[in-house]
Structures are given as structure tokens and as C-alpha cells.
Image (tube, rainbow, N blue to C red):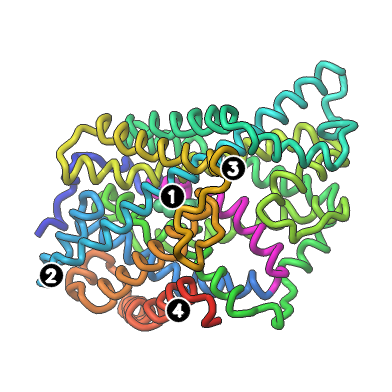
């Protein structure tokens, strides 16, 4: 059986268990935690959304996370090859590889717009770096950010950024270039190095800014907002977005965790590793809420600002804060670090496919897929200016009024990702060989029974609901 070899097909692997854990946490922790989670929690009224979200993570996300780690560990090659191997050993149709293909395509599409949004973060890091530079030059390094600018002026920065194709393109190019460079250097030489350097820095910054927020901001109001449930706000739409966010945040349904799982060496305990990743990812999302909302509330701003919360509301809040210039700079560096460790995991999925299935070299594969995603990203960013009238899927009611970036985001998030997760849960919950599951995961008997029950029943049902309501929102 292949599951006893220690070398992967591509000959690559993590150098230790902690390298895998850090890389997987790096993949999970990203814009989803620092930008999308606070945005959704703010828009959905806080507590009830947050509590429901936590339920989704542990009842649905965690079993799926372990299922993807299992497929990678058992298959030990790119996602499609790994699924094929598990299917073979389980004597079921190789047609199951189709969900690996959906996942790899989804990862390729997601990284295209992820890089564009990360480009906005890069731009703001630049704005705050310049601002902090002038604060230092003025002999007042601990002043507030963007001194003397009105709320409109600060908000206009985002508007002006969106209006400039060249600025957006430059940022997108820089971010995608960095992602491609790391992926091209390989698993232990690139991805693992990036994760082992960046993730500790990430946690230091996260804790530091959160303590700062607790000192200067209104942490009790933020905690009350995030954790006091008003169950009347838990509408079907809010539940739907909480479920979708749990999948996105844990990087599920796009074969990313299968790919990372394929580089695990023998002897790594899979169950406890999955639990560690799920807890870390959720903790970061909650801490991000406890970092951002105290600052927003301290200045009396609106927590329900939506996607611009981080780019317009927060910079304005930093203006009124002591050391806001420095903290703003550190905040955007933090988001940037989280974003790049996620984007490398996204690009690694199609890259591993090119290596494992098409026989390409790593450099060629990373260049082809990174370059392709870069081009799709250009279409996304032009959708904010010269192509702002373009509605790529205008014939489809749910996308009728959706611009290019949001169409790629919506199509992957609402359709491909839940479809990938649905097929994963059916494949592992019903089809995969029981012995192979038991020997690879090494779970205790009760844990194994619970895992399979959740995968076979709860996950398919809940994920099917996301999928159907995402496609036909009029059912809600
Ligand atoms: N989990 C990432 C985030 O929360 O930002 C997004 C993501 C990364 C999704 C990698 C999928 C993936 F394979």
C-alpha cells in the first residue's frame, strides 16, 4: 500500500510536524479572518452570528478538515492524484477525482482576486508607512494617523485607489509576484520557510495590537457586541453566510488542505493536528474582532460598515488614536502577512497539479498558473474602473448586478467551494475504505465514530443547504 511510504510522489515534504501545522494555520488564517469575519460579524449584528459560526467550525469544518488532511496523507501527491489513489484503494469509481478538479480550479480562481484585495492591503501599508515616516521626521512618532485629514478625505483614498487601474495593477503585480516566488521555491524551501518566519511574527503583532486596542479602545463594548446573542438576528441568510465563512476561513472545499496534507510525513497525528488548526483559525478570527471593534467603538463609528470597514472606518479611527500612525502601519503589515501565507497555499494547489499530473517542473507550473491567475486578476481590478459596467454572468439572477471581482468571488464561494465540500463529505463519509481511514487517521474508536457520523450525515446536509440557498436565495 502506498500509505506506508514516506516520500511523496513529487519527492517533497514538510521537514517536521510543526512546519505542517504552521503552514496549515498560515493557509487558514488570512483575509477571511481579518477582513471578511469582522465585516460579516459587524453586518450581521454580532453575537448570534459569532456563536453560530463557532458551531459551524467545530461541527462541520473540523470533520471536513480532517477528511482533507486524510486524503492528502493517504494519497501523497497532488489533490487529484490523491483522491484517485484513495478511490482505488477503496474500490470506488475514479470519477471522484472530479471534486479535486473543481477544487483546483476554484483555488486558481480564488487566488486571482485574493491577490487584488491583498493589493489594496499593500497600498494601505504603503500609505501608513509614508505617514509614519513623516511622523518620525516631524519628531512625533507616536501621533495619530493621517493627521488633519477629514473622514471624507480618508475614505476617498479607497475611492481614488479603485479609480486607478495602474495603481491597482502595480499592487496586484507585487503581491502575485511575491506569492509566485515563494511557491516556485518549493515546499520545504519556500512555503515552509515563509510560514515558519511569518506566522510567529503574525502572532506577536496580533497580540500586541489587541492589547493596544484594549488599552485605548472600548473592549467591553466590543466584547458585548461580539458575544451577546440577539437570536432574532439569526436569519437564514445570516446562517448561510456563517456556514460559507466557516468553509472559506478553514480553506476547505478547494483541495488546499489535501495538497498540504500530502506533504505530511508518516507518524503525524492527524486528529489532534486538525483540532489545533481549527482552534487557531477561530481564535484569530475572534481576536481580530476584539482588535478591530474596540478601536471602531472608541471613536463611535459604525461596526456595520461592510467591506470598507478595514479600509475606510479603521484608518479614520487610527487618526484619533495615540500612536495611530504606527499601529495603523503594523495593522496593515499584519493583514499582509496573513494574506500571503494564504495565497501561497492557494497557488500551491494548481501548481502541485501541474507537477503531479502534467509532469511539469515546479517553476514552470507556478509560472503558468500564477501568470494565469494574474491575468484573471487584471480583469477583476479593471472591473472597478474601465470595465465597471461589465456584469460577466448577467444572465444569472443571483449575479445579475455583480461586478467582475464579486462574480469570481461569488461563483467560487457560493458554488464551487460548497460543491467541493459536499463531495468530500460524501466521499469520505460513505465511500472511502474503512480500514484505510482507521489506519491513516489513528483516531480512537469513539472519535472515529463521531467523525464519520458528522461527515456522513451532518456535513452533506448542511453544506447542501448552503449550496441550494446560495443558488436560489428566493427559497430563504
Ligand atoms: N482561509 C483563507 C482565509 O481565511 O483568508 C482563504 C483560503 C486560503 C481559502 C486557502 C482556501 C485556501 F485553499
Identify the residue position indicated by label 4 in the image.
465
Q: Is mark 1 within 8 Å of ligand 1?
A: yes
CA distance separating discs 3 and 4: 32 Å
Which of the labelled discs sits on residue 93, or is there none? 2
Contact between marks 3 and 1 (CB within 8 A): the answer is no
Helix, strand or loop at mark 3: loop
> Which badge, 3 or 4, is on the more N-terminal residue?
3
Q: In screen coordinates, is 158 left or right of 139?
A: left
Magenta stretch, residue numbers = 20-47
Q: In the rendered image of this protein, does residue 137 appear above or below residue 60?
A: above
Closer mark to the observer between disc 2 and disc 1: 1
CA distance separating discs 1 and 4: 22 Å
Name, please, the residue furthest toward the top.
137
Q: Position of residue 41 (x, y in %)?
A: 67, 64
Task: Report crowding for label 2: few under 14, some 14 to 19, many 20 or more residues within 10 A (C-alpha).
Answer: few
Contact between marks 1 and 4 (CB within 8 A): the answer is no
Closer mark to the observer between disc 2 and disc 4: 4
Magenta segment's dominant SS is helix
Helix, strand or loop at mark 4: helix
Which of the labelled discs sits on residue 384, or is there none? 3
Q: In screen coordinates, is 338 left or right of 412?
A: right
Name, please, the residue furthest toward the right.
148
Q: Position of residue 287 (x, y in %)?
A: 66, 56
Amino acid at each position: 500500500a502506498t500509505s506506508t511510504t514516506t516520500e511523496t510522489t513529487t519527492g517533497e515534504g514538510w521537514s517536521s510536524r510543526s512546519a505542517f501545522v504552521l503552514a496549515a494555520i498560515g493557509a487558514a488564517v488570512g483575509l477571511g479572518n481579518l477582513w471578511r469575519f469582522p465585516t460579516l460579524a459587524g453586518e450581521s449584528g454580532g453575537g448570534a452570528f459569532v456563536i453560530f459560526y463557532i458551531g459551524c467550525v467545530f461541527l462541520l469544518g473540523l470533520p471536513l478538515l480532517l477528511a482533507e488532511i486524510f486524503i492528502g496523507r493517504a494519497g501523497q501527491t497532488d489533490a487529484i492524484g490523491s483522491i484517485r489513489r484513495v478511490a482505488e484503494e477503496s474500490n470506488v469509481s475514479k470519477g471522484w477525482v472530479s471534486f479535486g478538479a473543481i477544487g483546483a480550479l476554484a483555488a486558481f480562481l480564488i487566488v486571482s482576486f485574493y491577490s487584488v484585495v491583498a493589493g489594496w492591503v499593500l497600498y494601505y501599508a504603503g500609505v501608513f508607512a509614508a505617514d509614519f515616516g513623516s511622523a518620525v521626521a516631524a519628531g512625533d512618532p507616536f501621533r495619530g494617523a493621517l493627521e488633519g485629514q477629514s473622514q471624507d478625505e480618508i475614505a476617498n483614498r479607497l475611492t481614488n485607489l479603485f479609480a486607478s487601474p495602474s495603481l491597482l495593477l502595480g499592487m496586484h503585480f507585487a503581491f502575485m509576484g511575491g506569492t509566485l516566488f515563494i511557491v516556485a521555491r518549493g515546499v520545504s524551501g519556500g512555503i515552509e520557510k515563509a510560514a515558519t518566519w511569518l506566522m510567529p511574527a503574525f502572532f506577536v503583532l496580533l497580540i500586541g495590537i489587541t492589547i493596544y486596542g484594549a488599552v485605548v479602545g472600548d473592549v467591553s463594548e466590543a466584547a458585548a457586541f461580539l458575544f451577546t446573542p440577539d437570536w432574532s438576528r439569526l436569519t437564514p441568510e445570516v446562517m448561510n453566510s456563517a456556514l460559507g465563512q466557516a468553509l472559506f476561513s478553514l480553506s476547505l472545499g478547494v483541495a488546499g488542505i489535501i495538497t498540504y496534507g500530502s506533504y505530511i510525513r508518516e507518524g503525524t497525528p492527524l486528529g489532534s493536528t486538525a483540532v489545533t488548526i481549527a482552534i487557531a483559525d477561530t481564535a484569530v478570527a475572534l481576536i481580530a474582532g476584539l482588535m478591530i471593534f474596540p478601536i471602531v467603538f472608541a471613536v463611535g463609528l459604525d461596526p456595520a460598515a461592510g467591506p470598507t470597514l478595514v479600509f475606510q472606518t479603521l484608518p479614520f479611527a487610527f487618526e484619533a488614536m495615540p500612536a495611530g500612525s504606527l499601529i495603523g502601519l503594523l495593522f496593515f503589515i499584519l493583514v499582509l502577512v496573513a494574506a500571503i501565507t494564504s495565497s501561497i497555499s492557494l497557488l500551491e494547489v494548481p501548481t502541485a497539479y501541474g507537477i503531479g499530473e502534467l509532469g511539469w517542473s515546479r517553476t514552470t507550473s507556478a509560472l503558468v498558473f500564477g501568470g494565469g491567475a494574474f491575468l484573471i486578476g487584471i480583469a477583476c481590478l479593471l472591473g472597478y474602473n474601465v470595465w465597471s459596467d461589465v456584469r460577466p454572468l448577467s444572465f444569472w439572477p443571483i449575479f445579475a448586478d455583480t461586478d467582475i471581482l464579486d462574480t469570481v468571488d461569488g461563483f467560487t464561494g457560493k458554488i464551487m467551494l460548497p460543491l467541493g465540500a459536499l463531495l468530500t463529505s460524501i466521499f469520505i463519509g460513505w465511500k472511502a475504505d474503512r480500514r484505510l481511514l482507521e489506519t491513516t487517521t489513528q483516531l480512537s474508536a469513539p472519535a472515529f465514530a463521531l467523525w464519520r457520523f458528522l461527515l456522513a450525515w451532518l456535513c452533506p446536509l448542511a453544506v447542501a443547504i448552503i449550496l441550494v440557498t446560495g443558488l436560489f436565495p428566493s427559497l430563504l
